[in-house]
Image: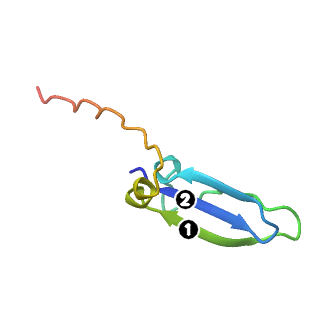
Amino acid sequence: MDDDLTIMTANGVAIRLKVKDVKQSGRATRGVHLIKPQEGDSVASVARISAEDLKKAGAQIEEKEAEPQPKLV
């Protein structure tokens, strides 16, 4: 999945990362931290940008070769 995730804090700190790079966690975990706001700051917005919208905007998206599927013996 080539979608991007953008997170912005109230103080204007922003990060952008690939959705596929966000680690999945199980039920017994406390979640995944993507940004650590400074003291007194907070997350103001989170936006998911689809790969299709990125292509429409002219972004260069890396096309990776599909990994070979394991063969059943």
Colour treatment of the image: rainbow
Give the class, few, some or many, for how many residues have Cα within 10 Å of label 2's Cα (few <14, many ≥20). some
In primary-sequence order, the first of circles 1 and 2 is: 2
Q: Amino acid at mark 1?
A: Ala
Asked where in the image residue 68 lies, by quadrant, the reply is: top left
Residue 29 visible in the shown view = no
Q: Secondary structure at mark 2?
A: strand
Q: Residues at badges 1 and 2 in contact (C-beta under 8 Å)?
A: yes
Give the left or right position of residue 73, taking residue 57 as reference.
Answer: left
Task: Report the front residue among 15 and 34.
Answer: 15
Give the class, few, some or many, for how many residues have Cα within 10 Å of label 1's Cα (few <14, many ≥20). few
Q: What x and y, as percent, mark residue 59?
A: 48, 49
Q: What x and y, as percent, mark residue 58?
A: 46, 51
Task: Report the front residue among 21 and 27.
Answer: 21
Asked where in the image residue 64 lies, by quadrant, the reply is: top left
Residue 22 visible in the shown view = yes
Give the left or right position of residue 9, taking residue 5 as reference.
Answer: right
Q: What x and y, as percent, mark residue 37?
A: 79, 62
Q: What residue appears at the point 55 percent right and 59 percent down from the top-left corner?
A: 5
Asked where in the image residue 16 lies, by quadrant, the reply is: bottom right
Q: What residue appears at the point 28 percent right and 35 percent down from the top-left corner?
A: 66
Q: Which residue is mark 2?
A: 5
Q: Amino acid at mark 2?
A: Leu
Q: What x and y, as percent, mark residue 31?
A: 59, 61
Q: Which residue is mark 1?
A: 47
Vertically, is 58 above or below 31?
above
